[in-house]
Amino acid sequence: MKKISLILGSLCLLYFAAYAVLTGLTNLFTYFWCLLGMILISASVFWETLMRWIKILPKWIKIPTFSIAGICIAALLIAEGICIFYSVKKPDPGADYMIVLGAQVRGKTPSYNLARRLDAAYEYLLESENTVAILSGGKGPGEELPEAQAMAEYLVEKGVPMERMILEEQSRNTDENIRFSKKKADLENASVVVVTSNFHVFRGVSIAKKQGLTRVEGLGAKIMWFTIPNLYLREAAAILKYAVCRQI
């Protein structure tokens, strides 16, 4: 176990460094891998001392501590399973509307994740001729235009007519994506597909249901392979937080 702890800790630190170089430290959760790596390496160095401390801990401390840790790990694994299940689930074709959730725009160009969402939306629109796309996303820091406008330009270049698109240019998060999109069309009685990155499908669909959409499914778009551990683990933690706070 001492060697395993050292190896896992080293891998966590290498993943953190690679992620920082390839994508930048765009969110605080990325530092989790650095912290976990240091904890695991420290545990391997002081393994014998750590085991002695655990053995001498009184039962009234040891049992609740390990029980809570076990419950937290089990809850995280369940949330991760739900996240993965929804990420690969495919919606039925022919929905009345699709809501494409915005993501970062670099200047006027959709980021990698946003472009993949738009590619997934485009493929769905090709097989669903009557579906109207609501492109949802406002203007954030470093963006020269609202995300919805950049999304529309991307789809127009791929041949989607503007008549099949509705632009929602005020939202800043998923909750606002759905809430403001509802003001653009009668979605509560319509069939709706929420298009987002694959790891985010469950939360996107759950937020839509929380806001009164009854016939809603999700469509997941691909993400860069090396971001999978970070984004899926972060999303599982976010699902637990939203569940505890009754946001989904």
Image (tube, helix red, strand yellow):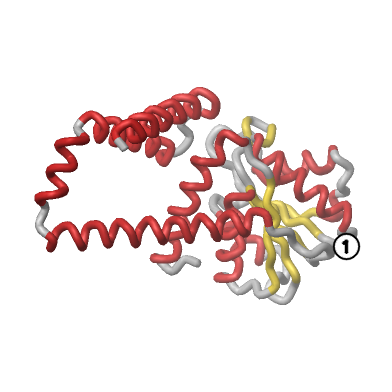
- Where residue 203 sits, quadrant-wise, is bottom right
Q: Is residue 69 above or below residue 18?
A: below
Q: Which residue occupies the foreground of this view, 57 or 205?
A: 57
Q: Could you tell me residue 186's position as x and y percent?
A: 72, 71
Label 1: state its secondary structure: loop
Residue 157 placement (x, y as % from top left)? 84, 37
Q: Quadrant of the N terminus?
A: top left
Camera-side residue of 183 and 223: 223
Residue 60, visible in the rendered structure: yes
Whether residue 121 is situated above or below residue 41 in the rendered picture: below
Q: Residue 71 appears in which quarter of the rendering?
A: bottom left
Residue under the point 73% across and 43% down: 151
Label 1 packing within 10 angstroms: few (<14), some (14-19), many (20+): few
Residue 136: in sight, yes or no?
A: no
The residue type indicated by label 1 comes to Asn
Hey, which quadrant is residue 152 in on the image?
top right
Residue at position x 60%, y 70% in the image = 209
Q: Could you tell whether 94 is left or right of 12 in the image? A: right
Does residue 38 appear to the left or right of 171 in the view shown? left
Question: What percent of the width, then of the height, locates residue 118?
Answer: 74, 45
**Please, which residue is most extreme toward the top here?**
21
Q: Measured from the top left, where is residue 212 in percent x and y?
A: 60, 74
Residue drawn 55% across and 37% down? 227
Q: From the image, tell me which residue sits under label 1.
A: 130
Q: Nearer the viewer, residue 191 or 243?
A: 243
